[in-house]
Amino acid sequence: MGSVSAQFKAFADATGELWAEKAWSDKVAAGFTIGSNLSGDQLHTIQYLQVFANQHGMLWASLDIPGNCDPQNRNRLGAQSGLIAHSKDGVLNDTDLMTAHYLGQRVAHVAKKFSG
């Protein structure tokens, strides 16, 4: 409903000790969400995740595919901050799945660059 689930919010709220210890500082993070409406305020969910990661000192890996500029049509909804997927019938769109796979590869690539 326009943000992260209650379960994720409870998880986030329980990370105070990790925050105080800087346990996740310099770790790589990224975000994705899916909704049943084309907008559905999914960007707010991504922004929540990004702010949460930043509060923990994490490094945010964005989706580096400009919307509608990819030969495979990945990032078809054009979100740069993270993956926004759309499903009106509960089935994940194949292109969104390809984009999710790409984002996972990007996170691994960024993490490898910073691993030293």
Image (cartoon, grey):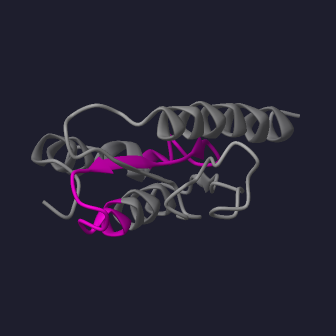
Give the vertical position of 47 relative to 65 (above or below).
below
Q: Residue at x 70, y 31 (%)?
A: 108
Give the percent coordinates (x, y) of residue 89.
19, 38
Give the vertical position of 100 relative to 10 (above or below).
above
Give the percent coordinates (x, y) of residue 19.
40, 51
The residue furthest right is 116
Does residue 26 appear left or right of residue 81 in this picture? right
Does residue 2 appear left or right of residue 21 in this picture? left
Q: Residue at x 43, y 47 (%)?
A: 32
Report the number of discs: 0
Give the vertical position of 75 relative to 94 (above or below).
below
Q: Residue 68 or 49: which is nearer the viewer?
A: 68
Q: Residue at x 53, y 64 (%)?
A: 79
Q: Residue 17 or 93: which is nearer the viewer?
A: 93
Give the percent coordinates (x, y) of residue 15.
29, 45
- Residue 43 located within the stretch drawn in magenta: yes
- Residue 52 located within the stretch drawn in magenta: no
Q: Residue 56 or 69: which is nearer the viewer?
A: 69
Q: Residue at x 53, y 39 (%)?
A: 95
The residues colored magenta run 21-45
Does residue 82 appear left or right of residue 88 in this picture? right
Give the percent coordinates (x, y) of residue 7.
14, 40
